[in-house]
Image (cartoon, helix red, strand yellow):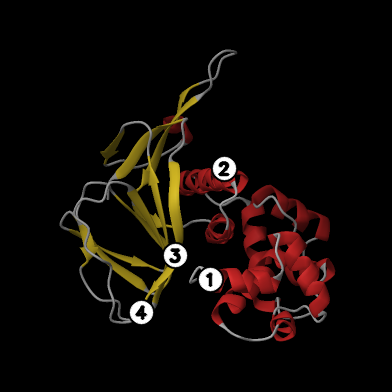
Amino acid sequence: MNTLIFEVPPFPTYIAGSKDCFNEGKKHMRRCTFSVFDLLIVNKGVLYICEDGVKYDVKAGEYLILMPGLEHFGYKACTVDTHYSWIHFCLEKPYVLKNCTDINWGMVLKQEHTYIESAKHMFHIPRYGKIGSQEFINHELDRLFSFNDTNSPEKRLKEQIVFQELILQLQKDSIQIPTSAEQVTKQVITFIQKNYQKEAIKMEDISKQLLFHSDYITRCMQKTLGITPLQYLTSYRLSIAKKQLTTTNEKLDSISRQVGIADSAYFSRLFKKVEGITPNEYRRLAKREGK
């Protein structure tokens, strides 16, 4: 597998993206003249893709960057329901493809900054590989796709910032062993995703489970994701609630209880504080836009 090499800044430009699913028996469409990069990240199942005569079986926890101008298509139907995220992006500067091994930060730094010029880096990202920091990537994908529901100029600009974080993480994953902070963060996220339906999750519970002091756990999360464990808990609960709002007709109090919030009124206030609209408004907007 070759490596995509390009200079930053400027960073790649985000165009569009979303989560999707190929049901069992379905496969990716054929494209002969697609003009942008297509980043595919598989969360569940296997995506069978052929590009320029090369076949890839992209499994859960793996990604593939499809190149502009090269024909690609699903060479085989999915054998199970396959859930994945797709991101279309472009590069403002020329790029090259090379067989590149043993990538290190010394290769990435091209020019130190001066008082009048910014630093320049040459990113080396394998086009096919495993997601090293899967929890972080999933969190950033949720952030990125949450902007799909609005045309606010501010959020359109934030899309670019979040996308840059994703690209930077792909570069880091290719050259860096997970730090202790990243490992602790992974344990926290695993615990929260298994227990989010329990109403009273406190830092003491997380600390007891992981056998680390709560202050240390919080510092690890803030260093890795930029948020605290309880902020991640809220974010994860609301992401589950949003799926329920758009895919079911269940009442708010039922959805609220399912995500570990017994008080539906508090759930509604929290939802509006984070999302900017009420749960009912979110549901109506999603149905109107066919989500």
Q: Nearer the viewer, residue 242 or 5?
A: 242
Above or below, 102 relative to 255 = above
Q: Nearer the viewer, residue 207 or 40?
A: 40
The part of the image, by quadrant, that contains residue 272 is bottom right
Marks 2 and 1, Cα distance to the nearest angstrom? 24 Å
Name the residue tied to disc 1: 288
Name the residue tied to disc 3: 61
Residue type at mark 1 is: Arg
Name the residue tied to disc 2: 157
Q: Is residue 158 among what the camera can see? A: yes
> Disc 1 vs disc 3: Cβ atoms closer than 8 Å?
no
Q: Earlier in the sequence, mark 2 or mark 1?
A: 2
Q: Which mark is residue 23?
A: 4
- Residue in the picture at 82% in, 66% down: 203
Residue type at mark 2 is: Leu
- Residue in the picture at 77% in, 69% down: 206
Marks 1 and 4, Cα distance to the nearest angstrom? 24 Å
Q: Nearer the viewer, mark 3 or mark 2?
A: 2
Q: Nearer the viewer, mark 2 or mark 4?
A: 2
Q: Nearer the viewer, residue 177 or 23?
A: 23
Outermost residue to the front? 288
Marks 2 and 4, Cα distance to the nearest angstrom? 33 Å
Marks 1 and 3, Cα distance to the nearest angstrom? 32 Å
> Disc 4 vs disc 3: Cβ atoms closer than 8 Å?
no
